[in-house]
Image (spheres, rainbow, N blue to C red):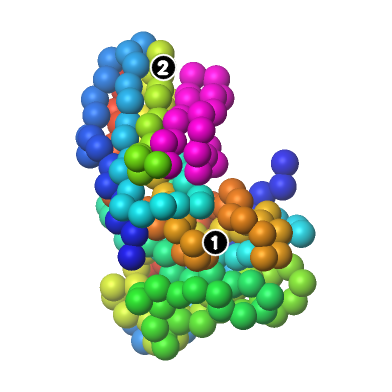
Amino acid sequence: GIQVEQSPPDLILQEGANSTLRCNFSDSVNNLQWFHQNPWGQLINLFYIPSGTKQNGRLSATTVATERYSLLYISSSQTTDSGVYFCAVESGVNDMRFGAGTRLTVKP
Amino acid sequence: EPEVTQTPSHQVTQMGQEVILRCVPISNHLYFYWYRQILGQKVEFLVSFYNNEISEKSEIFDDQFSVERPDGSNFTLKIRSTKLEDSAMYFCASSGRLAGGPQDTQYFGPGTRLTVL
């Protein structure tokens, strides 16, 4: 099956800093989503982005499908951005596969 | 904004017992999913469901598990004879994907934390 790798596994930032999270995948995809898992365990959908670029406030994402990677940018990070960020992909069938996540800690 | 709901939020059961986890997908969504997340690990796909039948299932989804859409709104996951290793957060999701159409955003419920003692 498709492999999903996320980097870095852990990231510690000072409030106000910017960051880039990466997701590499091993096959062509027709769905790619970024999620934020908050401290209560909820999975919050950030972007549906199988290709192209999207922005939502301080967050933006870019997927280069031909090169099999996606990037999530967080600008001017806040303590509430802390949590685990997951990338998940579907490749042709109805089974979305998640990466291992990037654990982000934003310090005040 | 429509959302996926799940009940209960937390279920505690004894090993060997059967549990049913319930989900109400977003109205008019056609594709439904179950995932699980063992504490500290990544989210794992269990099963997808469309048109009243299983569309895909992972190697985790063995004969111990079953899914059902008993009425027009609920989507359930049954785990027979629970084991200690079934302890996890179980997430339901639904997608606005059109019948036979391309993939679309999956929206996740808040999860049910299952604890098997």
Residue B10 in sight from this viewpoint: no
Report helix, strand or loop for mark 1: strand
Q: Residue at x 71, y 59 (%)?
A: B98
The circle drawn on residue A75 is 2
Q: Nearer the viewer, residue A85 or A5?
A: A5
Q: Nearer the viewer, residue A2 or B47?
A: A2
- Picture quadrant where residue B89 is located: bottom left
Left or right of residue A100: residue A33: right
Q: Residue at x 42, y 42 (%)?
A: A65
Q: Is residue A63 magenta?
A: yes
| Boundaries of the magenta span | A46-65
Specify the quadrant that holds the C terminus of chain A: top left
Left or right of residue B27: residue B62: left
Q: Which residue has dot 1 on it? A: B92
How far is disc 1 from disc 2 in space, using C-alphas?
A: 30 Å
Q: Is residue B60 magenta?
A: no
Question: Mark 1 is on which residue type?
Answer: Cys
Pointer 2 indicates a residue of which chain? A
Residue B20 drawn at (x, y percent): 54, 77
* Vertical arrangement, residue A1 with respect to residue B5, above or below: below
Report helix, strand or loop for mark 2: loop
